[in-house]
Image (spheres, rainbow, N blue to C red):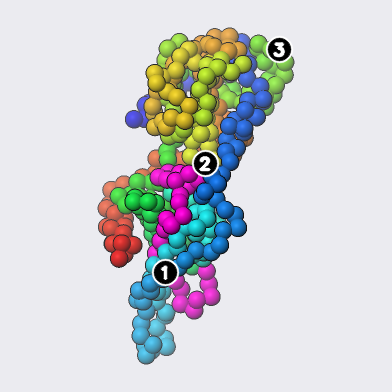
Amino acid sequence: MPFSPITASPGKAGRLFFACAIGSVCTVVICNALQRPHSSSAVKDDAPAVSFRQTAVPSAAPASAPPAAPPEPARMTESATVDGTFSDAAQSLGLDSSTIATLTQAFAAKVDLRRDLRKGDTLSVIYDRPQGGATPHDEPLAARLTTGSSSHDVFLYRDAEGEARYYSKDGDSTKPAFTRYPVEFTRVSSDFSLRRLDPVTHRWQSHDGVDLAAPIGTPVRATAQGTVTFIGRQTGYGKVVMLENPPPYSTVYAHLSRFAKGLRNGATVARGQVIGYVGRTGWATGPHLHYEVHVDDVAMDPLTVDLPGDDRLRGEERQRFAKEAESLSAELSG
Ligand SMILES: [Zn+2]
């Protein structure tokens, strides 16, 4: 699916003469598109606590063990019934906010937590609780979110730096990967900049994206999975597609000559899927793709912004992980 981009030389010369006219106003457009109200059925900030099931699988030494033996953690499985938000349910299981954020991101790749979560769905977690009880426990080793008749599992993997990441059972990352470039381009015809002389409006303004020069009709691909939040024409942008990608990302593809057939507002697109074709609609002085990446609604330089890569586990590590995940999955089902 990933296509190999042509690495363009920076091509600084003449870049101001072959550019488009997109001002900072575009940021506002994206912000509005993303300010989606929470689903009323799934979100209640003052939701009462959830119901509880707790099964302890003690792996600790018996009480009569010699005092010198270090205490073994007890492996716990706990479940909460969703009565408010995902975060309420996770909190009721004693998870801290950073763990909840990590889990939210892991499940967000599989479930729309704002729309698909219903009262009565369940969240189950497995973790090793240190004996003594006072210390808050670590990230769960595994978590299962059961929504309606389907369930979604994620499993903990700690990378070399000790950072907790969640994977699917077979070792695929739950973080969706991004491709750096949406198009095979010949050169970067205008860089991202906070202030430049716009070639069309002849005013100083920011350039919230990067211009990638390519012949008219070159396919433009979604750089990550996402949902179409806008498809149509806008002043400046011309024919434009906007995608809401997995949080905190959103992307914009402008000056298109035409859209991919059948692409509609609200449609889901996969990474690498063709969404349109390079053109020069809107304020463009030549054929190119104007491409923006927003992080938490702030425009970032698409050529340098930090993007999640394809960090699936490989080789022996993947096999070992899958085996452990299999046994944790059986515990969640038990
Ligand atoms: Zn541009």
Sequence order check, earlier mark of 1 and 2:
1
Q: Position of residue 69 (x, y in %)?
A: 39, 83
Q: Is residue 322 visible?
A: yes
Q: Which residue is rendered at x = 39% and y = 18% of the image?
A: 261
Q: Main secondary structure of the magenta part?
A: loop
Give the left or right position of residue 191, taking residue 180 as reference: right
Q: Nearer the viewer, residue 148 or 233?
A: 148
Q: Is residue 324 above or below residue 209?
A: below
Q: Position of residue 121 (x, y in %)?
A: 42, 55
Q: Nearer the viewer, mark 3 or mark 2?
A: 2
Label 3: which secondary element: loop
Q: Position of residue 259 (x, y in %)?
A: 44, 17
Q: Amino acid at mark 3?
A: His
Q: Mark 3 = which residue?
A: 202
In this rendering, the count of numbered labels is 3
Label 1: which secondary element: strand
Q: Which residue is rendered at x = 58% and y = 41% of the image?
A: 37
Q: Is residue 315 magenta?
A: no
Q: Nearer the viewer, mark 3 or mark 1?
A: 1
The residue range painted magenta reads 108-136
Q: Nearer the viewer, residue 229 or 4?
A: 229
Q: Amino acid at mark 1?
A: Arg
Q: Which residue is rendered at x = 52% and y = 26% of the image?
A: 230
* Number of other residues with Cα within 10 Å of mark 2, as a class: few under 14, some 14 to 19, many 20 or more: few
Q: Amino acid at mark 2?
A: Pro
* Number of other residues with Cα within 10 Å of mark 3, as a class: few under 14, some 14 to 19, many 20 or more: few
Sequence order check, earlier mark of 3 and 1:
1
What separation in Å lies between label 3 and label 2 (alpha carbons)? 35 Å
Label 2: which secondary element: loop
Q: Which mark is residue 247?
A: 2
Q: Mark 1 = which residue?
A: 53
What separation in Å lies between label 3 and label 1 (alpha carbons)? 65 Å
